[in-house]
Every structure is written in structure tokens, then in C-alpha cells.
Image (spheres, rainbow, N blue to C red):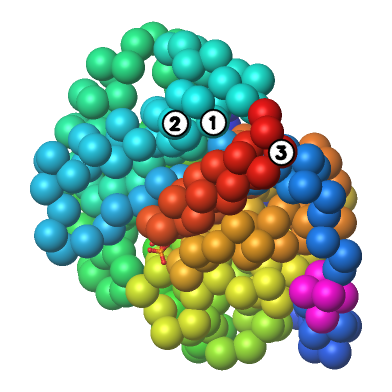
């Protein structure tokens, strides 16, 4: 996987100029929520796009090797053969309709890597691992870095780190920057770093924007909304703020950083709202698994149901 963003020097002056217009963010969210529904055939195409951007996730205290293996199989074969064929795809080993990644705890990386390896060389489903004291991030830095190295050593291609929210809440941007730089270094040259901001715990949208900038300046390849364990997880207003920060970072540095909403996304309608938001703020070039992911444990079954209904009702 190509590393997208090398990062740059932290300029605190950049952060001091951040201003988030709350009513503009609310207005954009309202417009998105009330936009005209897509025609059925476009909707099906967009749902397939959403499916290929999913990081299919299991992060339970009761995860076992067998449910992780089943998750990998679902990631590889997310739709029944008849539905795939009706939509114009072969049920072949190199079928492009699979999720972008599976996302697991570090102790389950090895199992996921071994399972996906059995699907053949052409299978490019990534194994992502959470790390750094997920979900709270409240562990000594040394052990948080060690967790990253462990997951990379076991074969994870992507590391979903969590930031220490207290550094945002107390305005310690330089400390956050240095921690994230060390995490990026621990990811090494081949694993992507996806930084979870836990936006629902950052108090306000200016902090979300500033944390997004610091995470990107420190070299994050993706910024991710939530762990799925906060009281408030992925919401469109958070997404709008993060997407605008990504756009500003791109305009200033030329580096494209991905966005990963995660936590509580369960329905096809929610997934489509995210895709439309990304298209409007960042443009079509962001609508690929290289730059957009949806972290979700329960979304895939709703997309599958919707596509099955579409195939049945269109007599395909
Ligand atoms: O990173 C992914 C999230 O933990 C998934 O959250 P979810 O179980 O609410 O879909």
C-alpha cells in the first residue's frame, strides 16, 4: 500500500487561525439530510461503492479466531452469487466486490492475515488493527508504541491508532504532534496510519478541526472519526469539519489524506450520506478505498438486503 502522507513541520500559527462556523456546518448537514433520493440504478451503484469502502470490523471482548475467520470470509464474499451475477460481476477469485479491509484487535491480526492469504494472491483485502490502548488511548506511550509494532510484525497493513484526547482538551498540540510522529514511525514504511480522533470526546468542532490538522501534519494517512465506543460516534457534522480540514491540508501541502467515519453507521442511507458529503467537499477522487473508508460492524448486512431487493424488484 502506498503511503499517502509524509507529514510536515507543526506550525502552531496555522492552528491559531482555525475558525469553524457552526451554523454553516449545521446548514450543510441539513442540506445533505434533505437532498433528493438517488434513482434506483444509481443507488445500487453507490451502494456497491460503499461496500468496497467498508473496513469490516469486529472489536468485541468475545472475539475468537473462528469469528474473525468468518468475518474475513464475509469480507471476501459479501454478496450471494445470484446478486453479484445480476449486477454484472463474476463470482471469481478476483471479483472486485469485496470490502476494503477487515479491522480487528492486535491479537487477532495473525488469524486474519492467514485467513485472507488462503483466498489467493489476487485478494487485496487489507488487515487493519486497532492499537495504542484502543479505545481510550490512556496507556503509557511506550506500551502504545509497542502495540503498533506488535500488530505490524503480525502482518497488519493498516494501524488504526487512537489519540490521547486529554492532549486536545488541554491544548497540548505539540505533545500530540510528537506522539503521533512516533506512532507513524512505529508503523514503519509499509503500514498506513489511520488516526482515530474520537470526535465525540473533543468538546467542540474547533478542536475537531485542529486535531484533524495536527494528525495530518504528523503524517496520518487517514483521519477517522471514532472508535465506535464513544457515546457520540460518527456524525455528518464531524465529517464535514474533518473533510474541510483534509481539503485545506491538501491545498497547503499537496498531500491527500483519507477519511474514515466509524461507529454507529448501520444503514445504507447513512453510508450514502457519507459518500455524497465526500463527493461534495473533496470531489470524486476521494471516493475510492485509497481515500475513503467506512468502519462498520453492522452496515454490510443492510447494504446486502438493499441490493437483493433492488435485484428482485428490477427483475435483473
Ligand atoms: O472502527 C470501527 C468501529 O468500531 C465500528 O463501530 P460499529 O460497531 O458501531 O459499526
Mark 3: secondary structure: loop
Residue 180 in percent (x, y) is at 47, 57
Q: Find residue 214 and report its image quarter.
A: bottom right
Q: Are marks 1 and 2 in contact (CB under 8 Å)?
A: yes
The residue under the point 70% across, 82% down is 206
Q: Which residue is mark 1?
A: 83
Total count of labels: 3
Mark 1: secondary structure: helix
Q: Of the two numbered discs 2 and 3 on the same chain, state the one appearing first in sequence.
A: 2
Residue 234 in percent (x, y) is at 55, 71
Q: Are marks 1 and 3 in contact (CB under 8 Å)?
A: no
Residue 80 tag number: 2
| 224 relative position to 188: left or right | right
Pointer 2: residues within 10 angstroms few (<14), some, or many (20+)? few
Is 31 placed above or below 101 here?
A: below
| 10 relative position to 39: left or right | left
Pointer 3: residues within 10 angstroms few (<14), some, or many (20+)? few
Nearest the viewer among 210 and 37 is 37
Q: Find residue 135 and report its image quarter.
A: bottom left
Q: Quadrant of ligand 1?
A: bottom left
Residue 203 in percent (x, y) is at 56, 90
Q: Of the two numbered discs 1 and 3 on the same chain, state the one appearing first in sequence.
A: 1
Q: What segment carries the magenta color? A: 30-34
Amino acid at each position: 500500500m502506498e503511503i499517502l502522507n509524509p507529514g510536515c513541520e507543526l506550525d502552531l500559527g496555522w492552528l491559531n487561525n482555525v475558525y469553524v462556523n457552526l451554523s454553516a456546518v449545521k446548514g450543510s448537514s441539513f442540506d445533505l439530510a434533505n437532498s433528493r433520493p438517488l434513482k434506483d440504478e444509481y443507488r445500487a451503484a453507490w451502494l456497491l461503492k460503499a461496500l468496497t469502502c467498508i473496513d469490516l470490523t469486529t472489536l468485541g471482548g468475545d472475539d475468537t479466531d473462528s469469528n474473525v475467520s468468518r468475518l474475513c470470509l464475509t469480507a471476501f464474499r459479501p454478496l450471494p452469487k445470484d446478486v453479484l451475477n445480476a449486477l454484472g460481476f463474476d463470482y471469481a477469485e478476483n471479483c472486485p466486490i469485496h470490502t476494503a479491509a477487515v479491522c480487528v484487535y492486535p491479537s487477532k491480526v495473525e488469524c486474519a492475515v492467514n485467513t485472507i492469504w488462503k483466498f489467493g494472491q489476487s485478494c487485496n483485502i487489507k488487515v487493519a488493527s486497532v492499537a495504542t490502548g484502543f479505545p481510550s488511548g490512556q496507556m503509557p506511550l511506550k506500551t502504545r508504541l509497542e502495540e503498533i509494532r506488535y500488530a505490524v510484525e503480525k502482518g497488519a497493513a493498516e494501524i488504526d491508532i487512537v489519540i490521547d484526547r486529554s492532549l486536545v482538551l488541554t491544548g497540548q498540540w505539540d505533545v500530540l504532534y510528537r506522539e503521533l510522529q512516533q506512532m507513524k514511525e512505529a508503523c514503519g514504511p509499509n503500514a498506513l496510519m489511520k488516526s482515530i480522533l474520537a470526535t465525540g470526546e473533543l468538546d467542540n468542532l474547533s478542536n475537531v478541526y485542529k486535531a484533524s490538522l495536527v494528525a495530518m501534519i504528523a503524517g496520518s494517512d487517514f483521519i477517522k472519526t471514532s472508535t465506535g465506543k464513544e457515546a457520540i460516534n460518527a456524525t455528518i457534522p464531524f465529517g464535514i469539519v474533518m473533510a474541510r480540514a483534509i481539503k485545506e491540508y491538501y491545498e497547503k501541502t499537496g498531500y491527500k489524506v483519507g477519511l474514515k467515519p466509524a461507529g454507529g453507521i448501520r444503514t445504507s442511507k447513512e453510508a450514502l450520506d457519507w459518500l455524497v458529503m465526500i463527493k461534495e467537499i473533496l470531489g470524486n477522487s476521494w471516493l475510492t478505498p485509497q481515500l475513503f473508508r467506512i468502519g462498520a460492524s453492522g452496515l454490510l448486512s443492510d447494504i446486502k438486503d438493499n441490493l437483493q431487493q433492488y435485484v428482485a424488484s428490477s427483475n435483473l
